[in-house]
Image (cartoon, grey):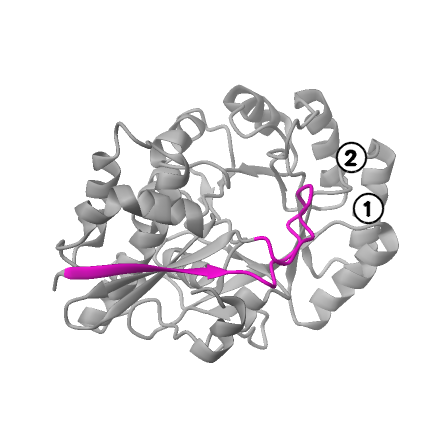
Amino acid sequence: MKIVDVRTIALGGATHDHGWPGGTDPNVQYNTLVEVVGEDGLTGIGSCYTTRALVEGALTLLREHLLGESGLMPERVSEKLRQSMFWLGRGGSVEHAISGIDIALWDLYGKALNEPVSRLLGGDYRDRIKPYASILFEEPGKLREKLLEQASRGFKAIKMGWRPFGRVNEKYDELLIRTARETVGEGVELMVDAGGSEQFWPHGVSWAKRTAQMLGEYDVVWFEEALQPDDVAGFRELKESSPVMISTGEVLVRRQAFQPFIDARALDIIQPDLTKCGGLSEGRKLAWAAYDHGILLVPHGWNTAIGVAADLALSAAMPVARWVEFQTGVPYIEEILTKPFQLDADGLLRVPTGPGLGIELNREALAKYAPRS
């Protein structure tokens, strides 16, 4: 089955506040879907965490290397695209586009074989996994309300991130964590994301060490992005003294960017975003490299329902996987599928078992957020 077309769908109008400066505009366009079409009419769907303009720009470079290729060899085709860009974009937005294409190729492959992607990635170690509700920090009163909302939905784990944590003072940081623990009790896992990839992050290892000690006193599971994204030595120093697990990786692309962290055992958890890092093909390589070094993989999932489905497939196919990220209240996740994701009575998500990613787009609902497509 040859690939005959590749199309993009821009999502806008309901973009969730992402915590960055200027991040409250719902019309900002950061999520782009990619459809790869086979000659028999089958279509695979993928997702990129970047703008349609950048994806289309990358496709002007990638299209000639993709069209006419096999729709049954996702890993080889994606690597061909990556290798073909050695002068023009070893990473960055070109890799983001390749990520969406790769996810779409795996979806197409699974549909052609009538098999779920998780099985094609190597086999299912589990059919359910714990999602953690991913929310932004707020002042204590609003934070309490948001935490209670997630608990009422059945989440057994919640991650809080970004502002105002790390941006006021250390006493305020502890107030936020104390508020969170008192609100949800001991029965809900809590994770903390400092957002160290934000512009001009001011904190270094000393702050991160003090903060990690504080988080340990409240039984926080992991401390995410405590330092700037590329500080391998800093993360290793932090990990060596931290009572909680240390994680990062959402902004890194290509396996080569993760390798120094893995080789140095600088992290307890790597968090590649499959819609940016190179897709499922690159994510699988990262997962096994991490596993061989005693490091967990928890995919970053600040994206779309397609991204969540990819995260579930990869997590099912890894021998050690404990959580997947689930951004709540986001239409691009909760409204664009014919059968939206639902937590079961144990607060877990089931891994889709249908062909490909095991999901189907609700085209009518999708049209509300893709009017320009």
Q: Which residue is mark 1?
A: 176
Q: Residue at x 37, y 34 (%)?
A: 91
How far from the left and from the top, in percent, is residue 217? 76, 40
Q: Which residue is mark 2?
A: 167
Residue at the far front: name it. 372
Is disc 2 placed on a helix, strand or loop?
A: loop
Determine which quarter of the picture holds residue 121: bottom left
In the rendered image, which quarter contains the N terminus?
A: bottom left
In the rendered image, which quarter contains the C terminus?
A: bottom left
Q: Amino acid at mark 2?
A: Arg
Q: Residues within 10 Å of mark 2 (few under 14, many from 20)?
A: some
Is disc 1 placed on a helix, strand or loop?
A: helix
Residue 338 shows up from this direction: no
Q: Residues within 10 Å of mark 1 (few under 14, many from 20)?
A: many
How far from the left and from the top, in percent, is residue 174? 82, 40
Residue 199 sits above or below residue 135 on the image? above
Q: Is residue 40 left or right of residue 318?
A: left
Does the segment drawn in magenta span residue 12? Answer: yes
Camera-side residue: 169 or 345? 169
Task: Give the label, 1 or 2, closer to the camera.
Answer: 2
How far from the left and from the top, in percent, is residue 170? 82, 32
Does the segment drawn in magenta span residue 98? Answer: no
